[in-house]
């Protein structure tokens, strides 16, 4: 399968479903491409080596990464956070579809919910199924973190979320609690799959203790409780500072190591200094490679979340990292995350935002022998390998992707019979709805081209030629002429390249020479979308299959024209035309029209309407015309 990963966050940002996820899919034999933003999470500043521009394409360990413009911000400002979310959504919607190849399935990493906008556009244009991977539930997350406090806005966001989920073929959630809640909100149960997150195994180091780090930050000789992750309202880390205060006198060997970045970091650091919490150390965010050497230094690994109903069904991604590290875990959270620790027998679970309970759990671990703590860590590692590892999860995702593709193919088959009404009435209505106002708006351009062409190329300014239309009916096609009638001393026309001035090349390169084709559409001989009309002399050479291209009205643009025609064989183009005949629908035509826009403006180097096998110039001699006919006739046999 060709899989497109759509995510606002991707390497080098710390993200779970990043480069390792893409590489694991490639290892299974799939082709993977990524559409993302410029890295700025979690600090809200663009990473070194990057700068914001409309788009950038790079290759990272064999994976093609397409980045589009984004407003960098991850602070407490609601306005700036919204600008961050919507800037990526708009860029990915407007630029993204023209950067990426057509996928078989679109994987969408959620959050934020605004990712549903480019997802919908990519689905419409590429006609591919969506698989949502929901890591945060909206509007629940907005309410729990305090980002949005107005009930009306939260209700609107909730309606938006359900609408987005209905647009997906499959939804993947990280916990059973997420699944239950979505079913309660009306999402069909058979659409939802639970796949636990895994640890980014490929980005881990040797997992040997980093003694240099231990010496630098004073970890030697201490009982180290390590927290690694975001510093934000959802983590409620003030409770950890309260527990540290309780430990200072009774367990002076215990210290809390908080590693990470986030909007609460400066406030927490000020509190540590103000209250003299010498047994708390706030360390800047570290790479995952570095963390693999820090986890073995920990005597306990801490997960802490806000005491909120949402977090009882959420499993923080650090949970899997901690289990994989093989160290005892203190889980200060309710629900699904706590259940994993209980099932794995990897540590202790306590209620969140309860400093006394956290203090007691840490003391209990500190009083245990090293052998007892090692057994807890080994239990966690074994459970992770058996139930939560990348190897387990990636196979589950592959199965979900195949289900989504199969459902889409079945639906397209079911819809084929319902397209007859559109073929008979809707297609013509769409053509007229677009062509009539276009001719009015473009009339000044028509007049300007006529005047300039008369001066530069002479009269007539148009090129006309007979073509075969629907059911083989012959009609006359119109285009602006792009070549002169210059001949050599013997009266023979010069080669095309010598008869095409810069002005004529400009007309072809910009597809302005195709504009009179709108008149053909107005007259009903052509449509905006359909197979390219060819010369009537070729009709006897079509196979039965290829002849089906004449079952619909020919078009100015179409599936074959948008598939790199100059590099495609005649047979491949015929196959595309027949595919279009079998898939005519309003969505197909809209998708192909949208795909035509960047082709016209040259974003991908294909000029619409200029087919290398078309014989389009009025001045071509009869003998040359016959030679062209014979060569194309052989290609059709």
Image (tube, rainbow, N blue to C red):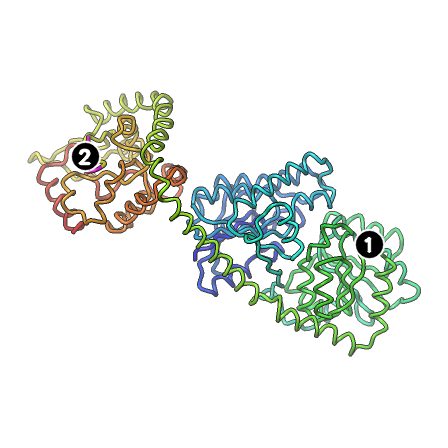
Q: Specify whether 541 is left or right of 282.
A: left
Q: Magenta span covers which residues?
A: 471-475
- For image coordinates 47% across by 45% down, the residue present is 123
Q: Specify whether 354 is left or right of 10.
A: right
Residue 47, placed above or below residue 591? below
Q: Which residue is mark 2?
A: 473
- For image coordinates 67% across by 55% down, the residue present is 177
N-term-proximal mark, 2 vs 1: 1
Task: Using the image, tell me which numbered label, if any, was put on residue 613.
Answer: none
Q: Secondary structure at mark 2?
A: loop
Q: Which residue is mark 1?
A: 353
Does the magenta-highlighted stretch encompass residue 473? Answer: yes
Q: Secondary structure at mark 1?
A: loop
Residue 310 location (% of width, % of height): 71, 50
Does the magenta-highlighted stretch encompass residue 491? Answer: no
Residue 359 location (% of width, % of height): 86, 62
């Amino acid at each position: 399968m060709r899989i497109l990963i759509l995510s606002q966050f991707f390497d080098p940002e710390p993200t779970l479903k990043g480069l390792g996820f893409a590489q694991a899919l490639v290892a299974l034999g799939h082709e993977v491409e990524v559409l993302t933003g410029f890295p700025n999470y979690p600090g809200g500043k663009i990473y070194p080596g990057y700068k914001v521009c409309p788009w950038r394409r790079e290759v990272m360990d064999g994976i093609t990464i397409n980045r589009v413009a984004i407003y960098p911000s991850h602070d407490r400002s609601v306005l700036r956070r919204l600008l961050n979310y919507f800037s990526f959504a708009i860029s990915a919607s407007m630029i993204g579809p023209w950067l990426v190849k057509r996928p078989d399935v679109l994987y969408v990493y959620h959050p934020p919910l605004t990712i549903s906008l480019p997802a919908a556009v990519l689905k419409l244009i590429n006609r591919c199924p969506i698989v949502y991977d929901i890591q945060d539930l909206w509007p629940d997350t907005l309410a729990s973190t305090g980002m949005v406090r107005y009930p009306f806005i939260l209700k609107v966001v909730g309606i938006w979320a359900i609408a987005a989920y209905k647009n997906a073929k499959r939804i993947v959630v990280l916990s059973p609690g997420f699944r239950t809640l979505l079913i309660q909100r009306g999402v069909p149960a058979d659409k939802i799959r639970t796949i636990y997150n895994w640890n980014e195994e490929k980005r881990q180091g040797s997992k040997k203790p980093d003694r240099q780090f231990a010496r630098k930050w004073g970890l030697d000789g201490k009982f180290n409780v390590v927290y690694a992750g975001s510093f934000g309202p959802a983590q409620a880390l003030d409770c950890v500072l309260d527990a540290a205060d309780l430990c200072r006198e009774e367990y002076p060997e215990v210290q809390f190591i908080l590693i990470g970045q986030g909007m609460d970091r400066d406030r927490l650091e000020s509190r540590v200094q103000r209250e003299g919490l010498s047994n708390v150390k706030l360390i800047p965010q570290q790479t995952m490679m570095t963390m693999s050497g820090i986890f073995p230094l920990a005597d306990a690994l801490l997960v802490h979340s806000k005491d909120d109903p949402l977090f009882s069904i959420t499993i923080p991604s650090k949970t899997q990292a901690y289990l994989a590290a093989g160290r005892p875990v203190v889980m200060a959270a309710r629900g699904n995350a706590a259940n994993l620790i209980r099932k794995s027998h990897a540590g202790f679970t306590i209620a969140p935002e309860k400093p006394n309970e956290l203090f007691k759990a840490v003391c209990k671990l500190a009083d245990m022998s090293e052998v007892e703590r090692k057994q807890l860590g080994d239990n966690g590692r074994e459970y992770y390998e058996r139930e939560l590892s990348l190897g387990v999860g990636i196979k589950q995702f592959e199965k979900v992707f195949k289900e989504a593709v199969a459902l889409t193919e079945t639906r397209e088959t079911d819809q084929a019979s319902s397209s007859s009404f559109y073929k008979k009435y809707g297609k013509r209505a769409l053509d007229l709805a677009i062509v009539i106002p276009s001719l009015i708006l473009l009339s000044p351009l028509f007049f300007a081209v006529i005047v300039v062409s008369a001066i530069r190329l002479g009269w007539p300014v148009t090129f006309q030629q007979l073509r075969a239309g629907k059911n083989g009916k012959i009609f006359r096609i119109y285009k602006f002429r792009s070549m002169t009638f210059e001949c050599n001393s013997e009266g023979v026309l010069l080669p095309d390249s010598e008869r095409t001035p810069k002005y004529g090349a400009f007309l072809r390169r910009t597809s302005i020479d195709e504009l009179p084709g709108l008149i053909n559409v107005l007259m009903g001989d052509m449509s905006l979308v359909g197979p390219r009309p060819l010369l009537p002399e070729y009709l006897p050479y079509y196979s039965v299959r290829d002849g089906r291209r004449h079952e619909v009205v020919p078009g100015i643009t179409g599936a074959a024209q948008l598939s790199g025609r100059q590099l495609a064989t005649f047979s491949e183009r015929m196959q595309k035309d027949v595919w279009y005949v079998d898939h005519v629908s309003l969505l197909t035509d809209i998708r192909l029209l949208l795909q035509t826009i960047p082709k016209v403006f040259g974003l991908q180097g294909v000029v619409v309407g200029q087919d290398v096998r078309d014989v389009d110039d009025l001045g071509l001699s009869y003998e040359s015309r016959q030679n062209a006919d014979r060569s194309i006739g052989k290609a059709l046999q």
